[in-house]
Amino acid sequence: MSSSPVAVYVGEALAAYGFGEGHPFGPDRLHAFWSRMQELGLDRRVQVCEPVQATDEQILRFQTRDYLARVRHQSQTGEGYLDVCDTPAFPGVYEAAATVVGTTLAALDDVVNARCRHAFTPIAGLHHARRDGAAGFCVFNDCGIAIETLRRQYGIRRIAYVDIDAHHGDGVFYAFEDDPELIFVDLHEDGRYLYPGTGAVKEAGRGAAAGTKLNIPMPPGAGDAEFFKAWDVAERFIDRAEPEFILFQCGADSLAGDPITHLEYSAAAHRHAAGRLQGLAERHCGGKLLALGGGGYNRDNLARAWTAVVEALLGESR
């Protein structure tokens, strides 16, 4: 195994999480990323790790038992939707979704136990799923399961969840809206113009958690200049919070040319965010940083954005 400080998780079992050819979240997304990793020679500069399927016990740290049973049933029939109309069931959807969760948790364990310093798993960051249901192409919320696992298994409580996907991470936000130890920072396209319609500035946490959440809605057409300005605010917020662990959802649907969103970043935004978060992780977390791929439906975009994240985690600039 490479002695690289960065681990990347790939394999056919992870690529299987997709909703068929022609669907924005198709099974070819991982291959687009990995092809560019190989073109750049990055595959030889990271630890390459295999996917892992989660157990029901792990999934139930966040999802409800009734919902888990429903996914298992529809995985056998392959029929219907797991939500209203965005997330179709398919034969084996349980195994595919459980593999996303298990791979995220394997990466988490590798970071916590210092087998690597930082990790990236491309088919992950399914931030829309609720505790009791699917939403927005997300069957199980591996982000929420990771947060619960950090608390229950490792005793790590003060966690920063940072999300630059074009879509607001509503499944994470509302699950932990009243949790004062979950630092939530989300830069997303303004919900007045894009699904799921949430993430207004005024949504800053409830009760004891008031002020621990930062939502930054970005106007349609916002590019790198607007992102860098907003990022400065986000970075100061994270720095003040002094987290013990950083989860970074780096959805690539915020790049110009995505077929279902309206932001216009370049991969420089993702490179910048990953590099700055790496610095914060070194300052506050002993380096503990896990990046999760999230959305991105233009294959060239996600390949460029995610390889930029990996390069930044390696401490490289381009």
Image (cartoon, helix red, strand yellow):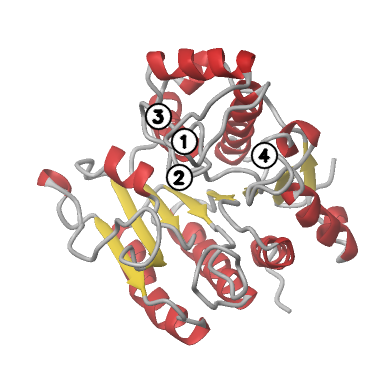
Find disc 1 in the rendering and name its residue. Answer: 141
| Sequence-wise first label, 1 or 3 | 3
Which mark is in front, 2 or 4? 4
Secondary structure of the residue carrying numbered label 3:
loop
Farthest-out residue, bottom: 225
As drawn, 262 above or below 143: below
Q: What residue appears at the point 82 percent right and 61 percent down from the top-left corner? A: 36
The image quadrant that residue 182 belongs to is top left
In this view, which residue lies farthest toward the left?
Answer: 207
In this rendering, the answer to whether 295 lies above or below 56 is below
Residue at 54% in and 12% down: 73
At numbered mark 4, what does the secondary structure look like: helix, strand or loop?
loop
Depth check, mark 2 against mark 3: the one in front is 3
Give the distance between the C-alpha atoms of the residues marked 1 and 4, in whole angstroms: 15 Å
* Circles 2 and 4: CB atoms closer than 8 Å: no
Task: Name the residue carrying label 2.
Answer: 127
Query: How far apart in space, not on screen, are marks 1 and 2 (Cα)?
Result: 6 Å
